[in-house]
Structure formats: C-alpha cells, structure tokens
Image (cartoon, rainbow, N blue to C red):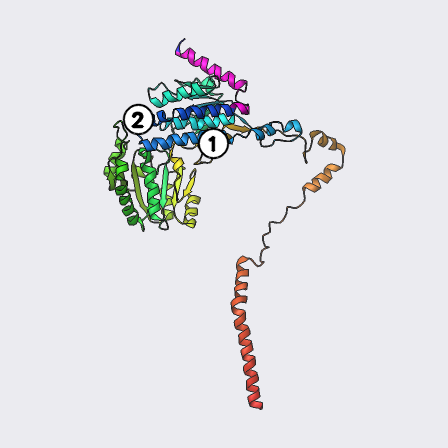
C-alpha cells in the first residue's frame, strides 16, 4: 500500500472510532490514561537520553521535564471522578437538569513543537483523553529519538483505532472535522476553519523590575528563566525593564549570579553538543546596540542602549538576557506598548500597588507577581484565549463545548403555557410585575454626606470637640472665679 493509502486508512480508522463514541465511556478513558502512564514510566530513561541529545539539556534538566510529563498525565487521570460522572450522565433520567454539561470534541489533531517534544505531545494528548476525544498526532518523518519513542508508546499503550500518529499532514477534508492543537503557530501560519487551540510561539515575555522590588530575588528568578533549558523555553524572559534608581544594584547582583552559576552554565550534555546560541542576526544586534553586562560560555547579559533596537521588541533566542533602563512605571508601560501587541506573559517584581498598576495597563495573557513558576518553562506556550495555568498546560474544558440538558423545573415557562395567554388579561399583570423598579444601588443621594465628608465630621468630633468643650469649661470657671473675687 502506498504512503498516501496508509494515511487515508489510518485517518478513516480514527474517524470511525470518533463517530461511534469510542472514548466517551469513563472507564475507557481511565484505562487509556493508566496504560499511557505505565508505558511512559517504563520509557522515562529513554526520554531523558533523547532530550539531552536533541534539546541540549543537562541530565538534571531532562529529568525535570520527564517528571513534569508524568505529573501531567497523573493529574488528568486523577481528575476523572467515575461516581460523579455517572451521576451527571443519569441526571435527566432522574428528572434533574444538567445545566453545565459539556461534550468533548470527537476528533483532535495535534501539531507539537520540537522543544521537549514528548511533554508537548502527552500534555495535550492526556487532556484530550480525559475529555473523551480521539486524537491524531502529526509527527513528521524525522529520525530523532523522541519521535520514535512517542510512536512506540502510542502504539503500545493506546487504542490503535482511537489514537494515531501520522508522518505527513492530513488533508483539509479531514482537518475541517478536527479541533486543531497548534503549538507551532506563527503569524504567517494558515487560519483554521473550525475551533482551534493555538499557542502563540512568537509572543514575547517581559519582566518589569520596579524600585520597590527585592532585587536579589528578582535577579535569581529572571536569570533562571533565561538560562535554564538553554534559553529555549517559551516563557523565558525576553526583555527586562529595570528602574534606573536600582539598575546598578540589579547589575551587580546579576554579575554575582553569573559567577555563582558559572559551572552550571558551562555544563554541556554528554554527547558534546554546545548549548543553543542566539541567532546570527541577534548576535550582530548585540554588538551594535548593547554593552555587555557579563557572560559565561554561550550565556550573556547585555544592556541595550537604544530604544530603537529590535532586541527590545522581539522574541529572544538562546541564553541571551536583554536589559534596559526605565525611568518610571509609566515609562515601562509606554515602551512595552509601543508595539501594539499583547505579551505572552508579564513578570512584575514590585510591591503590591506598583504590581497592580503594571498589570492593569500592560496587556498580557498572564501576569505573575514576584516569581516565575518553574512549571511554566517546560513545553509550549499556553493556548490563546484560555487562562494560563502553571500546573497544567491543557485542561479538559479546552476540548469541550457546552451542551446543557434541561428538564421542566423551577420557574421555567413552557411555550404552551405562554400560548394560552393570548386572550387573557394575565399578560398585563405579567408586564406590570416585570416593570417593577430595580433595587437601589446603595449609593448615597447627590448632596448627601459621603465617605469623605463623614470622615471630616468624625475627625472634627474626635479632635476639635474636646478642645471646644475645654475652652467653654475653662471660660466658665474663669468667669465664676472672677465674679467671686470681685463680689466677695
């Protein structure tokens, strides 16, 4: 059979499984996740080796990524509550509405990113299994070890009719029936006709360090986000905007961090590959627009001099930390908003009021205050239009759509009952009832004593009244004393 014929057969098989509702059964979903977790644990060491070679990670970093992958599958398995789902399924049978009912997309098509590919695939796949979807994973015919492992695990652990890995892109006639999970999406990528979960791979991540920040903590968090995983994480800080009043302290702590972490930065993977480096174009921009704060091996921190530099407005590649001084919070806001685009994440290092102000006026998919979650640095960017969660990259609800089931209960008006009102005076009474005034807002009427005026009055009572009373008493006493002296 030709490659095209094999693809058509595989897609037809998974489409049939989706139509017959293969994954709707709760026990089936539990068994699939349990089998997947077991197979992943058996191949955990192989994934560690693959990520060391293909993503240039240290063994410790690869261990963390594989651990995160297993924890995601475990969480989706534990989220399934058989007794609760069974009770919900029979709600209508027992005359109860199920108003928050949701149904899973029948078919899911996953386009994974290459960075930590195993995590990228199985974080999405396990969420789809929890929801009850059949899945196709696009794994182009690459010779890398991660792709081979993913294929092997899917074939061994999952229902071969409900879950398929393919080595070429499916035709448009099939894709139009799928929920698309695109982790590689770029501005130039094609737009999908149906529902899709798109990760904005080109979205920037910025950090703002205010003068109220704890500088030592801010430097450590920002430095770790950029230097871990060779600077490949989608949520590594791309640009740091530091208040000029604390810039010198920030840079001093940054140099100290380079010194302390020198051995970890220099560490290379066992196969001798070097860490990822910035692109040649970004390297040239560094030479032209920046002064070097410190460097170690391929890692570098630079201070950008010119605001016209592209380094302040684009996604950074590799272990390159870009820093720029700001004069105030408004200056940071204006600079970040000079490009009309939402950032993927905003990390604010500041006291509460300043952090609130920044997050209010800088459009961002998510804001984190005074920390950078370690879980966020693994895998793809979160899908656009859904809350970013550090603990799970994908959640069940992303793969579902509302489909409530409602029985006649409470104050639901049946159509036949309303129809009976055609020649009845009751409709006028209903209109009068619906026209009742709205409840008051509780706001004081215009000219009434407000919070400020009440405060002034209270302050006067507390501070001025004793003085006035004391004056009156003193004057009275003096008058009596004088009278007695004169008359006596």
Query: Regarding mark 2 in the picture, which secondary structure is present there?
Result: helix
Location of residue 280 by image quarter: top left
The residue lying toward the viewer, choosing from 321 and 132, is: 132
Q: Residue 380: name its quadrant.
A: top left
Indicate the quadrant containing the N terminus: top left, top right, bottom left or bottom right: top left
Q: Main secondary structure of the magenta part?
A: helix
Query: Is disc 2 in contact with disc 1, using a CB cutoff of under 8 Å?
Result: no
Check residue 7 for magenta coloring.
Answer: yes
Mark earlier in primary sequence (2, 1): 2
Q: Residue at the spot x=49%, y=25% of the render?
A: 129
Tell me if I can see residue 138 in this picture.
no
The structure residue drawn at horizontal position 41% and vertical position 30%, both measured from the top left corner, is 69
Which residue lies at the image location 40% right of the left edge and 36% below the top edge?
375
**Residue where numbered disc 2 is placed:** 53
Q: Which residue reaches farthest right?
A: 424
As drawn, 208 above or below 136:
below
Q: Secondary structure at mark 1?
A: helix
Between the residue at mark 2 and the residue at mark 1, the CA separation in whole angstroms equals 28 Å
**Residue 281 drawn at (x, y percent):** 26, 32
**Residue found at the far bottom of this picture:** 488
Q: Say the numbered circle drawn on residue 226.
A: none
- Pointer 1 local density, CA inside 10 Å: few below 14, some 14–19, many at least 20: some
Residue 346 in view here: yes
Residue under pointer 1:
75
Percent position of residue 59, x then y: 32, 31
> What range is drawn magenta here?
3-28
Q: Nearer the viewer, residue 396 or 73?
A: 73
Classify the position of the C terminus by image quarter: bottom right
Residue 298 left/right relative to 27: left
Residue at 43%, 17% (x, y): give it: 171
Q: Provide residue 414's location: percent of width, then percent of height.
A: 69, 31
């Amino acid at each position: 059979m030709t490659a095209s014929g094999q693809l058509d057969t595989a897609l037809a098989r998974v489409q049939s499984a989706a139509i017959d509702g293969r994954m709707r059964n709760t026990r089936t979903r539990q068994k699939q996740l349990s089998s997947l977790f077991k197979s992943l644990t058996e191949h955990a060491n192989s994934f560690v080796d693959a990520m060391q070679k293909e993503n240039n990670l240290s063994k410790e970093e690869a261990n963390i990524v594989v651990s995160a992958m297993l924890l995601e599958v475990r969480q989706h398995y534990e989220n399934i509550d058989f007794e609760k789902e069974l009770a919900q399924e029979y709600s209508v049978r027992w005359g109860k509405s199920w108003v928050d009912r949701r149904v899973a997309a029948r078919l899911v098509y996953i386009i994974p990113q290459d960075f930590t590919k195993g995590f990228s695939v199985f974080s999405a796949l396990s969420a789809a299994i929890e929801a009850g979807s059949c899945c196709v994973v696009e794994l182009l015919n690459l010779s890398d070890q991660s792709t081979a492992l993913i294929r092997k695990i899917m074939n061994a652990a999952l229902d071969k009719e409900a879950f398929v890995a393919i080595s070429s892109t499916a035709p448009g006639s099939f894709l139009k029936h799928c929920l698309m999970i695109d982790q590689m999406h770029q501005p130039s990528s094609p737009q999908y006709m149906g529902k899709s979960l798109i990760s904005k791979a080109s979205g920037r991540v910025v950090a703002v360090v205010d003068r109220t920040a704890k500088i030592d903590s801010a430097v450590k968090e920002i430095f770790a986000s950029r230097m871990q995983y060779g600077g490949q994480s989608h949520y590594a800080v791309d640009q740091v905007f530091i208040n000029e009043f604390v810039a010198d302290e920030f840079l001093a702590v940054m140099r100290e961090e380079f010194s302390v972490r020198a051995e970890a930065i220099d560490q290379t993977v066992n196969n001798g590959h070097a860490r990822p480096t910035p692109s040649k174009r970004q390297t040239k921009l560094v030479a032209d627009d920046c002064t070097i704060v410190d460097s170690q091996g391929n890692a570098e921190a630079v201070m950008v001099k010119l605001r016209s530099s592209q380094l302040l407005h684009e996604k950074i590649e590799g272990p390159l930390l870009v820093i720029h001084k700001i004069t105030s919070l408004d200056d940071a806001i204006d600079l970040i908003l000079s490009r009309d685009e939402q950032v993927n994440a905003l990390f604010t290092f500041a006291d509460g009021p300043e952090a609130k102000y920044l997050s209010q006026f800088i459009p961002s998919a998510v804001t984190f205050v005074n920390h950078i979650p370690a879980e966020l640095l693994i895998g793809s960017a979160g899908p656009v239009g859904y809350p970013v969660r550090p603990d799970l990259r994908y959640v069940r609800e992303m793969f579902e759509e509302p489909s409530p089931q409602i029985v006649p209960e409470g104050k639901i008006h049946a159509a036949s009952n309303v129809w009976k009102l055609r020649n009845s005076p009751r409709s006028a009474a209903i209109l009068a009832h619906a026209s009742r005034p709205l409840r008051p807002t509780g706001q004081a009427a215009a000219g009434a004593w407000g919070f400020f005026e009440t405060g002034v009055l209270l302050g006067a009572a507390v501070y001025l009244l004793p003085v006035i009373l004391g004056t009156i008493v003193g004057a009275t006493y003096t008058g009596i004393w004088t009278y007695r002296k004169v008359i006596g």
